[in-house]
Image (cartoon, grey):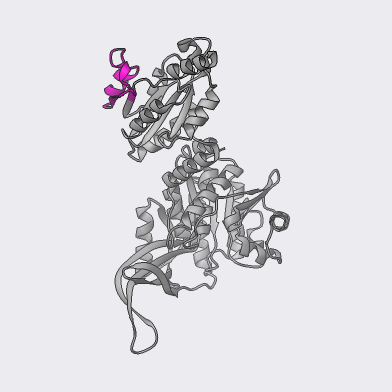
């Protein structure tokens, strides 16, 4: 599963996502809480720094950009300094901000968080100060939003509605957005607010409420997977949706469509701050679906992205590289280190983008002995990631004779995978690893010193790319052949 998911994540491309919703500015004011005020029993905050971030729908836009997508923003901002700041932040993510209408009647929705520090560390939010007008927007602004939505729709691959109940997505205009998008053949994804009625989202493609939001709208608590299934059935039928993704924090997400009804599990994370988690899930779903993923794969990717986001403080983005790294980490724990060449190529490309040094070696490794262990430890010291090409059973027979190998290729690979000095293993069937070396493109090629006068396969290719060949000293008297001969002689005695 993980190798296929890795392939999909690395091929998402740059989908265009039309995002409508409540765009907000999230500000964080950090200060050392050194003393209690003499005026009242409250901490005094000595300001250290201030950070402005994209919040609300703007957070979704930033998340989309971090995943390689292009966001087309449609919403309202105020004619104020907060609006100027927010627009600049969005432009820095290369989002299209032409669709942000400047309202003369309401301020830019903003949230300022005062964060206390102890000894310049240990962040703790002390207070949040909000500036907003959550009343319904006026008819003139509705018309302006619809016009810009229509003008941008054709260039988008998918449509997202992010509703924080700040007045932009009124029932009437929301239904118009959905109808326009569906008539244009575009999927409509909705991240709804905490509310007891989702009628205004009727006819959307997919909705992504969390556990609490779902409980509120269906009228019962979501405690079990059966509860989530029953709730999802209600959502699909009552609001004429194609799919529902109910996010269940540590349990993952329950996915319901006309063909799927299952829990998509996740790996429990240390939750530092849930701010922005829903934004991240919506952005990841939209980017994955618009990038060609099927629904289940998109939910798996959004699970990973959401889990990474809650480990960070405040509103934070999650990049494609972080998602790839998490998939690789999970693949190690779930499927081991053994990969076919197709998935191996993607993994190596990722490590190369991180600037890590790739080391390659190969061999039969039939009966593991001390010489092998020292050789692989030496190999690991030459770089960051060790890729080991393992001769298949057929190639071992051609090289060593019909009685070899003693251990089949699967057993040999399993033993090697247990070594910390080996990061990835792939089995090759050719007599030489030349093709595999050209696929891996290592920075360092390691062989035993006994190959010094034989000519190292792949040396010319590696050196032509600026890499090097390193020869490892051989432990005298230690080889698979010697070990096997000794075992045979013991058997004869």
Q: Nearer the viewer, residue 314 or 466?
A: 466
Q: Nearer the viewer, residue 225 or 206?
A: 225
Residue at screen point 39% across, 62% down = 53
Whether residue 197 is visible to the viewer of this picture, yes or no, is: no
Residue at screen point 51% across, 58% down = 277
Residue at screen point 50% across, 12% down = 397
User: Taking 286 as reference, is 225 left or right?
Assistant: right
User: Taking 383 as reference, is 369 left or right?
Assistant: right
Q: Position of residue 378 (x, y in %)?
A: 33, 31
Q: Nearer the viewer, residue 433 or 126?
A: 433
Count of all numbered marks drawn on residues in the image: 0
Q: Position of residue 37 (x, y in %)?
A: 34, 85
Q: Is-magenta flag for residue 112?
A: no
Picture quadrant of residue 192: bottom right
Q: Which residues are magenta?
A: 446-475
Q: Position of residue 11 (x, y in %)?
A: 47, 37
Picture quadrant of residue 169: bottom right
User: Taking 252 as reference, is 431 left or right?
Assistant: left
């Amino acid at each position: 599963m993980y190798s296929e998911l890795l392939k999909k994540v690395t091929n998402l491309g740059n989908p265009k996502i039309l995002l409508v919703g409540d765009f907000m500015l999230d500000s964080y004011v950090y200060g050392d809480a050194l003393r209690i005020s003499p005026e009242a029993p409250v901490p005094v905050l000595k300001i250290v720094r201030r950070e402005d971030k994209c919040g609300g729908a703007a957070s979704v836009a930033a998340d989309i950009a971090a995943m390689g997508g292009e966001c087309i923003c449609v919403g309202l901002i105020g004619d104020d300094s907060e609006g100027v700041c927010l627009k600049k932040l969005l432009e820095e993510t290369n989002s299209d901000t032409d669709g942000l209408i400047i309202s003369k009647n309401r301020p830019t929705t903003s949230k300022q968080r005062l964060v206390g520090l102890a000894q310049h560390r240990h962040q703790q939010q002390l207070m949040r100060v909000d500036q907003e007008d959550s009343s319904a927007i006026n008819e003139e602004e509705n018309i302006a939003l619809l016009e810009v939505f229509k003008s941008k729709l054709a260039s988008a691959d998918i449509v997202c509605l992010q509703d924080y109940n700040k007045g932009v997505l009124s029932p009437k205009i929301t239904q118009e957005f959905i109808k326009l998008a569906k008539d244009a053949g575009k999927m409509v994804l909705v991240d709804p607010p905490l509310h007891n009625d989702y009628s205004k989202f009727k006819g959307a493609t997919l909705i992504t409420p969390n556990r609490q939001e779902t409980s509120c709208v269906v009228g019962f608590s979501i405690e079990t997977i059966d509860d989530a299934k029953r709730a999802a059935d209600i959502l699909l039928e009552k609001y004429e949706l194609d799919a529902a993704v109910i996010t269940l924090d540590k349990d993952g997400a329950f996915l319901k469509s006309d063909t799927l009804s299952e829990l998509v599990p996740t790996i429990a994370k240390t939750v530092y701050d849930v701010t922005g988690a829903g934004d991240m899930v919506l952005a990841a779903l939209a980017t994955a679906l618009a990038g060609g993923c099927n629904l289940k794969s998109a939910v798996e990717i959004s699970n990973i992205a959401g889990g990474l986001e809650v480990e960070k403080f405040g509103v934070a983005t999650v990049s494609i590289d972080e998602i790839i790294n998490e998939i690789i980490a999970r693949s190690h724990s779930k499927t081991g280190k053994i990969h076919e060449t197709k998935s191996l190529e993607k993994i190596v490309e990722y490590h190369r983008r991180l600037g890590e040094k790739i080391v390659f070696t190969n061999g039969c490794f039939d009966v593991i002995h001390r010489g092998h262990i020292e050789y692989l430890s030496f190999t690991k010291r030459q770089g960051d990631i060790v890729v080991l090409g393992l001769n298949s059973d057929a190639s071992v027979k051609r090289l060593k004779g019909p009685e070899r190998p003693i251990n089949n290729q699967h057993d040999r690979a399993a033993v090697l995978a247990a070594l910390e000095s080996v990061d990835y293993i792939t089995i090759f069937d050719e007599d030489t690893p030349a093709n595999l070396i050209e696929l891996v493109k290592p920075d360092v090629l390691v062989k035993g010193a006994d190959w010094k006068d034989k000519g190292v396969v792949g040396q010319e290719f590696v050196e032509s790319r600026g890499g090097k060949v390193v020869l490892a000293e051989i432990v005298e008297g230690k080889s698979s052949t010697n070990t096997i001969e000794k075992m045979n002689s013991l058997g004869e005695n």
